[in-house]
Structure formats: structure tokens, C-alpha cells
Amino acid sequence: MKPRIAFFDFACCEGCQLQVANLGEALLDVLKLVDVVEFREVMSEKWAGPLDIAVVEGSITTKEAVERIEKIRARSRILIAYGSCATIGGVNGMKNRSPLEEIRRTVYGEHAHTFPTIATRPVDQVVKVDYYVHGCPIWPPEFIEVLQAALQGVPCFPPDHAVCVECKLNENVCLYDKGVTCLGPVTRAGCNSWCTNNGNICYGCRGLVSNPNTKGAMDVLARYRIPLELVLNKMSMYNACREQGKTP
Amino acid sequence: MNDVRSFTLNVEYLTRVEGHGNIVVNVRTGVLEECRLEIVEAPRFFEGMLKGRSVFEAQHITSRICGICACGHTLASLQAAEAAIGLIPSPQTLRLRELLLHLENLDSHLLHIYLLAAPDLLGVPSFVPLITSHEPVVRRALRMKKTVNAVCDRFVGRHIHPITTVLGGFTRLPRPADLAAMADLLESLRPDMDATLELLSSLRFPNFERPTEYVALVSDRGEYPLLQGDIGSSEGARLPKTEYRRATNEFIVPHSTAKHTRWHQSSYAVGARARFNLNHAKLHPAARKAAEALGLQPPVHNPFLNTAAQFVECVHGLEETIQIVEEFRAKGLDYREEFTPGVNEQNRIPVRAGTGVGAVEVPRGLLYHDYEVDERGIIRRVNCIIPTGQNLNNIEHDMRAMVPILVAEGRKPEEIQLRLEMLVRAYDPCISCSAHFLKVQCVG
């Protein structure tokens, strides 16, 4: 029997799921290997039984979501956190920078009480995660690689060096030389420096490397006379959940 | 007791739509008592997150509201941000943004037509069973989607969360080789487009008509207005985009956490059908021909035909994208306009305090972004009104009109349920967008 796989979404834009549809006809090859039993965005079929692989997109931002992800974990042999919102909290984490009550009132005014929310958490701050596919959005070749590893039961670790490594290999002009700040020096590679190849800065969507060279980064900031505040603000765009650690 | 004319429908987690919604219907002895579309999306508080950040970051962040219409949010966001700080984009930038908007509509419409709507019309729960029964159709769908994506990859780095589109212009402009590849890819879509027309002509859309008010951009210029224009209504009214609040008139209904909108009538519709009804004469001749082949004539009062109107826009979009790409291949691009603003560290772009409104025809209809920034370009207030938010009220009015007809026809509850799901899906709702902005008021 083919392994049963399902896609689940929590707080997110669902763009990473769409990247699956964007695989084109290669998707049909993937579908030969697995049995997709649930994928709400594109399928009406539903499945409540055990799963070999759960692909989870989105951040955990409500009490109901905590219960739901715990149930999904309980019936899944393997859980893949899929996309920045799931792996590091992503842009949803920006919410955590203001007191929750304040941000609720800003958006929903007097009706704030009808929109319960809790601090944004990536999936691994709630349940155990077996594999990670980082990125906003995910880089499709990396998803295929992780899926292959998960199906074979072998580990797969995302790179733990900076985006600068890939950016240099791609022969891009350093963004700092253009006078703008870039999170490439502290961000985990694996996207083939997607944004900087296209002339934009790295926003840190894949999370920070496990041992960021902060001293080197400070040197760069000093050399280009860039205020630290600007960088810290940028870093909070995707990585605001980083410090809160594993809380219940 | 078991009166067939009494039933309750509760469709939780509506499938094949973007985002999370429920349908609740309650019929007692043939009389419709309750009928609503609930929004259960986890709120993400985008407006709160934007407050206090640089206006130069607004595009990047708001693009993440929605994976399907990331380019649409991008364009509305840039329009609002540039208006707020008083920046006027170059003609080249505007033309390239038109190209991006056509690609966005093309990509999103194809996804909806094939993967979200077609399974209903072919009587299956998703595209998965179609892999066996209609393999060439599924292959074509995936191929077309992939092709449009490949064009976007060449053009703006990627379709989901485009990379090069920034305040003021583009961080990278397509090179001649990119333009050539884009032209080839777009040309390759033509046979598949013809085949799609054949497929759609062979499908039977449910019969149901309810005249309503249609709202879309209108303009005095020649082109089918998508990126620029005033807010127009089928009732004849016209407003500048800065006065969008007079067109949306948001109001609260007791059964829904999402705000509803109305203008002249009790509800209005936005989206491909509304645009077709208002601006049909400005469509590319090839698109008008496709409309004729599908039997579409304005005004289209059948909401199920929104899917057909989307296809007509696909034909229009393909012709327009090919034309724009060929135009730039002939005259070349001015690469001096390429630049990376970052968060304007170098103050290369003059910033002033102000407010700005963006109004863009994205796949699901008219999208508004409204920003207020201070003299340093820091965002102080944000308001966004999403097409699906505007359609919710109209969908409910359709449901209320349709259920009694189906009950009178003696349809079984499961048939009624499917028909209601199809109705909601025909609007191609993007609930994850609408829920993020169920905005009530913005407190300073």
C-alpha cells in the first residue's frame, strides 16, 4: 500500500501548498508514490485515520489550533513542518512584538473579544517535528528532497550555513555594496539565494543559522555605517518567535 | 417527523476554497429559516503588524496575506504606498505592473477553473479522481499553471510572493533572454487555451439567475481597466478610488464576524463577472469571441458563470501579456530604472507624510489598500478591503434566493448542499484574505 499523506493548514497564506500545484506535471510523478488522502485547499476528500506523513503549513495562533495539531501529531508517523509560518513562525510572529490585547484592538476595535488569539508559535514549539521545509514560500526542489528522505526514512537536515555562501556562488554583487542591509549573512541557506539573485535583499525567511556570526555581522554594519535598529527590525519580520523557545 | 422539507446543513471547513469557511442552512417545512456563510479563519492581524513599520516593507508583508493573489496584494500595496509618499512611478514601471496583473489573473483563474471548480462540473470530489478519468485534462491544467508560473519566475523571480516588485519599480528587470523565453512560454499556451474553451463549452453550469449590482474599476481610457480607473457601479455611479468607503459602506450583521458591504442595492458583486458586465466592450476581440462561444452576454446574472467570465479574462490576459512582452522586446527596457530600495536606508526616495489608496482589480475583484504614513515613512494606519469580503453579502443573498427554488424542486438536502458549495466556490472566495481584514475600526 502506498504511504498515506495529508496536507493541513493553520494560520498562513496557503501559498506553500500552492507551490505543490505549481510543480506542474511532476506532481503526477509524486502522486504515483503516495496516496494523498486529505488536502482541503484542492480536495473535498477527508480522512480521519492514521497517516504516514502529515505536511503542516502555518503557525499555531489559537487554542483550537493547539488541540488540532496535537491530534494530527498523534495519528501521524512523520510530521513535516512546511514553510516559514510552520518552521519558524514567519510573518505571523510580528504579532508577538506588541501586547496581544493592543494588536487585537488595533485591528478589530470594539469587536476584539470575538477574535481570540494566543502568541504565534511555530509547530515545533507545540509538537515534535520530524522534518523541516523552510522558506516563504518553500523552494519546491527542497520539498521534493525532504519528501524523498521522509519516504525512505532517512534524516534530512537543511543547510546550516549562511545565504551569503549561495549568493557568492551565484556571483551576485553584495547588497551592502549597494548601500542596503541584507539578512543573508545570518540566514540559513538552501534557497539558492532566491531573492538576492533577483536584486532584492534577503529578509531572513528561512530562519537564522544555528550559530549566526553576530560579530561578523556587526563588523559589516559598522563598515557600512548602518544603524543596528534597522537590522533588528528586519530580523523580527520572520524571526520574532525565535527567542520564546519551547513553551506549552 | 422525517419531513423531507425540513433539514439542516452544516458544511464545516468548506473545501477547494482558499481559507476556512462554513455554510449553515436551516430549512423547516420547506421554509428557509437560516442561511449563512461563516468565516472561521484564524485571524492574523496584518493591519496591526504593519503599524509602526516602514512603508518600504508594506509590499513584502502584505504579499504574505495570500498565496494565490500575492501579486494582486503587491500591486495594491505599492499603489497605496506610492500615493501616500507622493511617488509617481515611471511609465515603464506601470506597463510592467499591468503585465504582472494580467499574469496574476491568468494564473489564479486557471487554478480556479481547473482545480477548484471543474471537479464539481465533472461530478467528482477533486482533481485526484480526474487523473484516471480525465488524464489529459489534469495534465493540461498542471502544464498551463506551470507555464504561467515559469513566466512569472523569469519576470519577477516567482509568482508566489514576487521578489523584484518594490516601491518605486523593480529590483531586477527582465533581460532580453528572459523576454524571449516569456514570449515562447506564453505562445505555447494558445493550443491549451483553445482546449480549455472546448472543455468549458461542454460543461453544464447550473441554471440560476439573480440580478444584483456589479462593481468594478471603470475608466475613460481604451483598455479593460484593471490597474487604473475609478470605482464604477452597474447603477451608473462613479467614484474616485480615494472615496472607496462611500462605495463599500461596510456594516455589521449579527450572524457574521465578517463585515458586509453594500452600495445602491442590498448587496453587490465584484470579480470577473462584474468586470465583464461593466467593461465587456473593452475586452480583446479574441476574448469577446470566447465569450460568444460560451454564450456569455452582459449582463450575466448567473453567479455560476463567474467561472466562464474568468476564462474570458484568461483569453484577454494572454493576448495582452503577449502584446506587452513583444512591445518591450521591440523597444527594449531602460535598465537604469533597476534599483534596490531596501528600507530606504540611503534616503534615495524622498518621503513625506500622507495617505494613499490603492484600488486594483485582482482575480476575485476590487481590492483596496489604504495607508497613512508619517514624515519618516512609518505606517500609522492601514485599512484593506478584500474582494471576498465584498462578495460575502452577495453570496448570502444568492443562497437565500436559491435554496427555496431547490426545495420547491424537491431536491435532496445533499444535492442542495453540493449546489451551495458550488455557488460559494463559483465566487472563488479567498477567505484567508477576507478574514485578515474583518476590520471594524482602526484605533489611532
Image (cartoon, coloured by chain):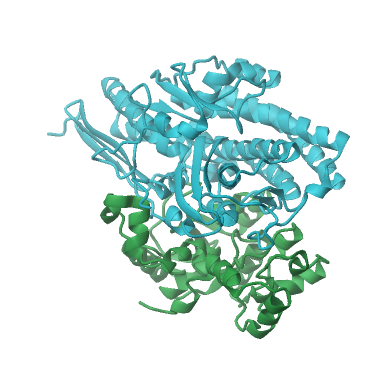
Chain colours: A green, B cyan
In the image, B107: left or right of B62?
Answer: right
Residue shown at 41% from the left, 69% from the top: A73
Could you say where residue A100 lies in the image, as x and y percent from the top left?
Answer: 35, 64
Q: Is residue B108 above or below residue B314?
A: below
Seen in the image, is B294 located left or right of residue B49? right
Where residue A17 sits, quadrant-wise, is bottom right
Residue A183 horizontal/vertical position (percent) = 65, 70
Picture quarter containing residue A60? bottom left
- Name of the residue lying farthest toward the left: B1
Q: Nearer the viewer, residue A67 or A99?
A: A99
Q: Residue A169: x percent and y percent?
A: 81, 70
- Residue at left 49%, top 69%? A79
Q: Is residue B415 left or right of residue A195?
A: left
Residue at left offset 62%, top offset 65%: A203
Foreground residue, A111 or B304?
A111
Q: Is residue B260 visible?
A: yes
Q: Position of residue A212 (x, y in %)?
A: 63, 81
Asked whether residue A161 appears in the rendered view, the answer is no
Please tell me whether residue A85 is drawn above or below residue B416 in the rendered image.
below
Q: Is residue A91 above or below residue B139?
A: below
Quadrant in which the N terminus of chain B is drawn? top left
| Viewer-nearest residue: B240 or A171 | B240
Q: Quick one: A242 or B21, which is closer to the camera? A: A242
Q: Is residue B12 above or below residue B233?
A: below
